Amino acid sequence: MKRLFFFLFISVALFSCTRVYSQKEQTTGQNTNILSNTTGNQNMKINADATDILSQLSVQNQSMQQKTFPVDKAINPDLYFVGPNDVFNLGIYGFLNQTVSLTVNLEGSLVIPSVGEVKVNGLSLTEAKEKVIKAVKKRYYSSEISLTLSMPRFFLISVSSLIQKKIEVTPLTRTSDIFSLIFFDTLNIQRIKYDKMNPKGEFSPDISLRNIQIIRKNGTAVNVDLYRYFNTNNDEFNPYFQEGDLLKIPFGQLIKNYISVDGAVQLPGVYEYNPNDNLESAISLGRGFDKDAEIDSVTVFRVDPITKRYNIFTLDFNNDKNFRIENFDRVLVKFKSQDIKNYSVIILGEVNRPGIYPISQKNTTLKEAIEMAGGFKSNAYLPLSILMRKYDDEYTKKDTAEIMLNIRANDLIVKEQDRKNFDIDVLSRRYRMIVDFEKLFKENDLSQNVALENKDVIYVNDDKKVVYVYGQVQNEGYVPYKEGENYEYYINKAGGYSLAAEEGDTRVIRFNSRGWYKADKTNVQSGDFIYVPKVVKTPFNENLTLISTIIGTLVSIISTYLLVKSANK
């Protein structure tokens, strides 16, 4: 019985194990059916070793320290060429989803376990993707495969310029990206020499920015023009580096090669010349046209090497963009003549609405401006009203200098004091316009209705009812105005003449015109000035000179008379 019971137990156990195994095989078979190919081969498992392969791939390159850096745009896969140390992400999506890192080895291959070695060196990124995906698909044909570049490689290029060295770059590095490193690297001996050449630490314009060359390892030369790159954002003028490149940055370009761009451009100046320059690139050097530029009338001045005279070319920018610019050419962009500008005048004082008012240059009149300001207030006093005009500084300086120069030909200035007075008058009265407000607004004398100019100042005064007395009087100052009184009344109010007064030369000076009038022949008005000069004592030597001159003249006249009389006998 015991033996029978033991055999029954073993049989049941074996049956149970067989049952469990059968169920497991059935489940596995169902999964295999789901993942099987369309040929119906139920015994072939798809990606059966994926777990092992992915586990191997996942540990690759864990020790590699990746560098990150900014880029100015996404990579163009047709222009990026793969090389050693490029880092990729391989994605396999299907029964299992996994992304793994792969690095191009020094022989230019991607080694993918269970797939094999795939040569990618020198291929464009587009070609490399197609090749790798095709190879992986042969092994994992039911999965979706992707290959993306996650980190570009670093390699060395040669630099020939202020420094001679190797510099680490990537396929996404341009000349502009390493320019500061080349010329402001503090860890090279040549920098010391550069600092001595430029003690202020300024960037020397003799370093070329437009005639840089990249020599590829196959010997072809690529031109770099940083000005045109930043003006156009065209990669042609600032290409990416490749392995084996030699970067050559020459000196002395601005001294030997330059053009000037002047006139209605954003940044006129002298710029380095590039043999590929045309009218369009020259204008771009000046940052483009000013809003007032006449783009259909651009003038290029070119020196004839034989006659040394300028040959002049008048161009229309839209039609002549490709006009070739030569070394030492001068490009001039004319400004449009503007008839409408933001001109204005200031009206102050006794008007109903003082303020700043727009005018049309040399068309708006004084009378129209007063009307815009609401007319005069009741207490406006026209004899004291003035119009001030300030011309531009350059004109004022030149005109004043001409007046000063004319002193040499002026026989009215005979004394040093006269010269000083003349200088003061010129400098202090430059901005007053001669306008009689009373004649214009009370008598409608349109000869006084002057046309206004930009920044004119109109000041309408009130009646101050004072007269200013100064010079050789006892008490200089303002005296209350009293209608009908003559100059003597105001001098008496000022304490009378002082001992040094030259009473006979007293003058009344009008406030508006600043004209000088004899006091005994002029009515004093409110706001006028009364000036009493000082007796001028002539030094003895001047008297002696005058007497000598008179005596000499008399002797000459008498001698001439005697000679004529003798000749007639």
Image (spheres, helix red, strand yellow):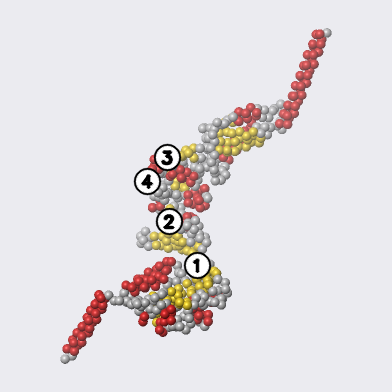
Residue at 36%, 73% in the rendered image:
421
Q: Residues within 10 Å of mark 4 (few under 14, many from 20)?
A: few
Dot 1 and dot 2 residues touching (CB under 8 Å) = no
SS state under label 2: strand
- Of the numbered discs 4 and 1, the one sitting upstream in the chain is 4
Q: Earlier in the sequence, mark 3 or mark 2?
A: 3
Nearest to the observer: residue 122 or residue 289: 289
Distance from Cα at disc 3 to Cα at disc 1:
55 Å
Q: CA distance from mark 3 to mark 4?
A: 15 Å
Query: Residue tagged by mark 1?
Result: 337
Position of 488 relative to 254 (above/below): below
Type of amino acid under label 2: Val
Residue that extends furthest to the right in the rendered view of this protein: 1
First of labels 3, 1 by sequence position: 3
Label 3 amino acid?
Leu
Q: Secondary structure at mark 1?
A: loop
Left or right, 131 with respect to 426, comes to right
Q: Residues within 10 Å of mark 1 (few under 14, many from 20)?
A: few
Picture quadrant where residue 140 is located: top right
Residue type, mark 4 in image: Lys
The image's mark for residue 187 is 3
Farthest residue to the bottom: give it: 569
Q: Nearer the viewer, mark 3 or mark 1?
A: 3
CA distance separating discs 4 and 1? 49 Å
Label 1, label 2: how far apart the Cα atoms are: 25 Å
Please indicate whether residue 540 sits to the left or right of residue 246 in the image.
Answer: left
Query: Badge 2: how crowded within 10 Å, few (<14), some, or many (20+)?
Result: some
Residue shown at the point (47%, 43%) measured from the top left: 178
Residue picked out by circle 4: 196
Above or below 90: residue 294: below
